[in-house]
């Protein structure tokens, strides 16, 4: 690649718009694939309120699902919610060239496999976002804090593609941790997301402080974390012994926070229940690890879904 790469973001909500803006700031050509917010972004571009300064930008290409591009992007970054009814492999198909690197910035466990199977010859880079960012209106994004990405080649390793993408994000002003073991990193992140995200929905969109300070709340969260940790270990990704204590004390120090699933619930959007919890329970069953708390929360939330 001689000039700066061409990036296409599929699903430019909070995460896609923010990381697209960072790559735009690094000098990339950045296109967006949009659905409900297409007209607003065509009129006004993407506006981002951020402590990093003015990140607002106009996309270089603006597409709807299935629209053609004259040439395949160097990086296709997928940032849609991971939901059972969404065929992500089919969604990205129109823009996947022979050497397009496929990049996921999405929450959950075991969410890469369907894409790795659909595109076995394209490098797949899996990323975890540590950021507080949300959509406030069509084409408007509020970046409150943080922004680090942890990234690596799926299923493991760090290759030139991950290095090059990491350099671009760094140039745009984001901190990156490259990892040889991205699946292990997904387990580390799910130690937090798997209890906090689904429980916040059962608790009507509660924030972290409410969840920890309700009598029995911390004990329930710890019990769920113990189960996630046991499944991670059975799956070959043991987590450090002190990680539960660190997660609890770190969360207690944060200002009260509503996670992305709480925001989806409060905005009547579907929640990523399987990606964040259902897949952990499925892996537990595969390894015969008992997960009574995780199962109870999963089943209670499934009862709320339209049958
Ligand atoms: N927000 C956060 O702070 C964090 C989010 N994450 C994870 O990042 C991922 C993205 O989350 P986030 O950005 O918050 O979610 P958003 O709901 O803000 O954005 C998702 C975007 O995908 C779009 N989309 C969905 N399907 C299609 C489609 N078929 N074609 C085009 N666009 C489509 C949506 O469009 P439409 O408006 O039409 O539905 C929306 O713009 C999730 O996995 C989440 O868990 C991880 C860490 C923090
Ligand atoms: C870790 C956290 C809370 C923000 O990065 C997240 O993943 C979410 O909101 O779902």
Image: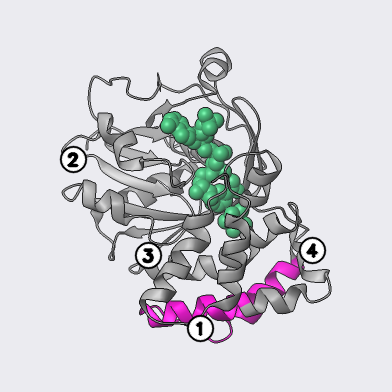
Q: Is residue 233 above or below residue 4?
A: below
Task: Give the residue at x 79% y 76%.
Answer: 216
Q: Residue furthest front?
A: 307
Determine which quarter of the picture holds residue 52. Answer: top right
Give the secondary structure at mark 3: helix
Q: Residue at x 77, y 59 (%)?
A: 255
Q: Quadrant of residue 183?
A: bottom left
Residue sitting nearer the eye, 157 or 194 = 194
* C-alpha separation, residue under disc 4 versus residue under disc 3: 29 Å
Q: Is residue 242 magenta?
A: yes
Image height of 137 relative to 245, above or below: above
Q: Is mark 3 within 8 Å of ligand 1?
A: no
Residue located beneath label 3 in the image: 182
Q: Earlier in the sequence, mark 3 or mark 1?
A: 3
Residue to which mark 2 is pinned: 99
Q: Residues within 10 Å of mark 4 (few under 14, many from 20)?
A: some
Mark 3 crowdedness (10 Å alpha carbons): few <14, some 14-19, many ≥20: many
Horizontal side of 206 relative to 108 (left or right) equals: right
According to the picture, the residue beneath numbered tag 1 turns out to be 240
- Observer-nearest of 163 and 109: 109
Q: Are marks 2 and 3 in contact (CB under 8 Å)?
A: no
- Residue 67, image x, y percentages: 32, 20
> Nearer the N terminus, badge 1 or badge 4?
4
Residue 45 visible? The answer is yes
Estimate the x, y position of residue 274 in percent, counting from the top left.
48, 56
Q: Horizontal placement of 33 versus 70: left or right?
A: right
């Amino acid at each position: 690649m001689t000039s700066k790469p061409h990036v296409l973001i599929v699903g430019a909500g909070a995460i896609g718009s923010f990381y697209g803006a960072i790559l735009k700031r690094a000098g990339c050509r950045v296109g967006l694939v949009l659905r409900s917010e297409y007209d607003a972004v065509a009129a006004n571009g993407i506006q981002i309120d951020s402590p990093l300064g003015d990140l607002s930008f106009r996309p270089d290409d603006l597409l709807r699902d299935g629209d053609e591009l004259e040439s395949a992007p160097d990086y296709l970054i997928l940032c849609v919610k991971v939901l059972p009814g969404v065929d992500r492999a089919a969604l990205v198909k129109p823009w996947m060239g022979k050497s397009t690197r496929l990049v996921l910035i999405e929450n959950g466990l075991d969410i890469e496999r369907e894409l790795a199977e659909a595109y076995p010859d394209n490098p797949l880079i899996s990323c975890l976002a540590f950021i507080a960012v949300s959509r406030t209106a069509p084409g408007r994004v509020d970046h409150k804090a943080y922004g680090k990405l942890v990234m690596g080649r799926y299923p493991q390793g760090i290759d030139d593609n991950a290095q090059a993408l990491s350099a671009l994000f760094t140039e745009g002003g984001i901190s990156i941790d490259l990892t040889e073991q991205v699946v292990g990193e997904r387990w580390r992140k799910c130690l937090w997301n798997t209890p906090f995200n689904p429980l916040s929905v059962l608790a009507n969109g509660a924030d972290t402080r409410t969840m920890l300070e309700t009598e029995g709340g911390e004990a329930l969260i710890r019990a769920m974390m113990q189960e996630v940790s046991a499944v991670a270990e059975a799956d070959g990704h043991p987590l450090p012994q002190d990680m539960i204590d660190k997660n609890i004390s770190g969360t207690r120090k944060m200002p009260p926070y509503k996670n992305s699933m709480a925001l989806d619930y409060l905005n009547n959007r579907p929640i990523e229940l399987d990606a964040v919890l259902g897949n952990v329970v499925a892996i537990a069953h595969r390894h015969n690890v008992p997960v009574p708390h995780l199962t109870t929360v999963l089943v209670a939330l499934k009862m709320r879904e339209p049958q």
